[in-house]
């Protein structure tokens, strides 16, 4: 599923931030969202392609997609549980 076909409820721009900040900011952002809502994280940190899927596994949230373009990485996550912290 690509991001053009996915309903996005909120966007978190972590461009320029390095690990672990994209994951930390993602966890904090999801805390304020409702179960079932989707968050698009925009990052330039290559490690996020590993960290955020692992974070989803550990927290029970759903990794929907990872899409890359020339400038950034777009990671889409659906909040599946109340606790979004690592």
Image (cartoon, helix red, strand yellow):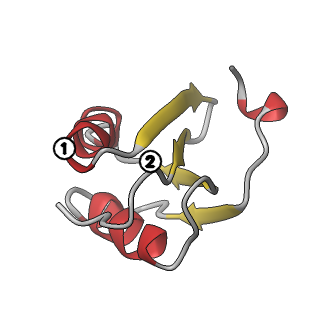
- Number of residues whose C-alpha sits closer than 10 Å to that of mark 2, classed few (under 14), some (14–19) or many (20 or more): some
Direction top: furthest residue: 1
Q: Quadrant of the C terminus?
A: bottom left
For mark 1, give the secondary structure: helix
Q: Pick whichever, 29 or 18, lies toward us.
A: 29
For mark 2, give the secondary structure: loop
Q: Position of residue 7 (x, y in %)?
A: 79, 45
Q: Residue at x 39, y 46 (%)?
A: 61
Residue receiving disc 1: 58
- Number of residues whose C-alpha sits closer than 10 Å to that of mark 1, classed few (under 14), some (14–19) or many (20 or more): few
Q: Position of residue 76 (x, y in %)?
A: 56, 42
In front: mark 1 or mark 2? 1
Q: Position of residue 24 (x, y in %)?
A: 28, 68
Q: Determine whether label 1 and label 2 are within 8 Å by CB.
A: no
Q: Residue at x 44, y 38 (%)?
A: 62
Q: Quadrant of the N terminus?
A: top right
Quote the CA–CA distance across marks 1 and 2: 23 Å
Q: From what the image shows, is residue 63 above or below residue 35? A: above
Q: Residue at x 71, y 24 (%)?
A: 2
Residue 10 location, quadrant: bottom right
Q: Pick whichever, 34 or 40, lies toward us.
A: 34
Residue receiving disc 2: 44
> Which of marks 2 and 1 precedes in the sequence?
2
Q: Residue at x 50, y 79 (%)?
A: 32
Question: Is residue 45 rendered to the left or right of residue 58?
Answer: right
**Marker disc for residue 69:** none
């Amino acid at each position: 599923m690509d991001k053009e076909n996915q309903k996005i409820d909120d966007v978190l721009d972590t461009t320029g931030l390095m690990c672990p900040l994209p994951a930390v900011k993602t966890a904090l952002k999801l805390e304020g969202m409702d179960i079932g809502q989707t968050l698009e994280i925009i990052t330039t940190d290559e490690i996020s392609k590993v960290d955020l899927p692992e974070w989803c596994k550990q927290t029970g949230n759903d990794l929907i997609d990872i899409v890359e373009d020339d400038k950034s990485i777009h990671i889409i996550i659906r909040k599946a549980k109340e606790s979004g912290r690592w």
